Image: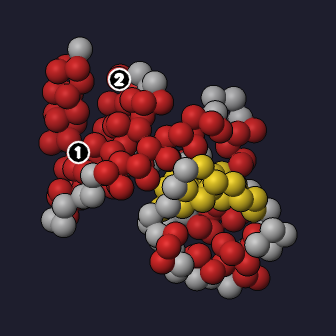
């Protein structure tokens, strides 16, 4: 697919190749195919569209119409790395942790267990990235943040996260 990256992305995400109007480059790292996208393509691929893309530097996804690639795709928002405070290698490493954690620790089938597994997965990835525990707690408990999809369980998860951080100290 060298020179036809947009065609591969269209196949993976089952979208019309004509919708992919921006630049995409491909790299790989261990079990992952990494898609480096401009902000328009990143927003097109992000599960929360433009709104989610504005908040995110990258994501690991299990979506793929190519079965052998399911669970091994990282999508990176090149635009974020033009701003101070964003580190491409740190973001890729973070998203690779999600893939590795999913390979090692598949989430349970119940909805609450999946949320809990996702929270644990995010905590592990951010801690390996060196994120400050106070910033980590804020990231998971702040309203309207990227992780606000835990809203129905925010109080419970906030308490669990506080207890986990205290236990680590």
Name the residue that disc number 1 marks: 154
Q: Quadrant of the N terminus?
A: bottom right
Report the quarter where the C terminus lies. top left
Q: How many marks?
A: 2
Q: Residue at x 42, y 34 (%)?
A: 126
Residue 3, image quadrant: bottom right
Residue at image location 54% in from the left, 78% down from the top = 66
**Horizontal and vertical percent for residue 158?**
22, 36
Front disc: 1 or 2: 2
Residue placed at 52% from the left, 69% from the top? 69
Tell me the distance, in whole angstroms, between the alpha carbons under discs 1 and 2: 17 Å
Q: Residues within 10 Å of mark 2 (few under 14, many from 20)?
A: some
Q: Nearer the viewer, residue 44 or 4?
A: 4
Q: Residues within 10 Å of mark 1 (few under 14, many from 20)?
A: some
Residue 54 visible, this orientation: no
Image location of residue 13, percent across then percent down: 57, 76
Whether residues under marks 1 and 2 lie with C-beta atoms below 8 angstroms apart, the answer is no
Residue 21 at what x, y percent from top left?
A: 79, 72
x and y percent of residue 22 in the render?
79, 65
**Colour mapping used in the image:** secondary structure
The foreground one among 28 and 79 is: 28
**Considering only order in the chain, which callout, 2 or 1, is on the residue closer to the N terminus?**
2
Which residue is label 2 attached to? Answer: 133
Q: Residue furthest right?
A: 3
Q: Is residue 149 visible?
A: yes
Element on which disc 1 rests? helix
- Examine the rendered structure and indicate whether residue 77 appears above or below residue 128: below
Q: Is residue 77 left or right of residue 67?
A: right
Splitting the image into 4 quarters, where does residue 36 fall? bottom right
* Identity of the residue drawn at 71% across and 59% down: 26
User: Residue lying farthest front?
Assistant: 30
Residue sticking out furthest to the top: 169
């Amino acid at each position: 697919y060298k020179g036809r990256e947009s065609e591969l992305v269209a196949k993976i995400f089952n979208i019309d190749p004509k919708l992919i109007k921006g630049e995409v480059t491909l790299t790989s790292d261990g079990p992952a195919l990494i898609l480096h996208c401009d902000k328009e393509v990143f927003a097109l691929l992000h599960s929360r569209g433009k709104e989610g893309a504005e908040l995110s530097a990258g994501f690991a996804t299990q979506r793929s119409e190519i079965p052998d690639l399911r669970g091994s795709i990282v999508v990176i928002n090149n635009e974020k790395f033009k701003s101070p405070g964003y580190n491409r290698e740190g973001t890729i490493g973070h998203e690779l942790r999600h893939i590795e954690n999913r390979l090692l620790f598949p989430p349970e089938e119940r909805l609450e267990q999946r949320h809990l597994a996702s929270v644990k997965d995010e905590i592990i990835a951010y801690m390996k990235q060196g994120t400050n525990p106070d910033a980590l707690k804020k990231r998971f408990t702040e309203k309207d943040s990227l992780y606000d999809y835990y809203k129905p369980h925010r109080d419970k998860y906030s308490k669990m996260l506080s207890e986990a951080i205290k236990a680590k100290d």
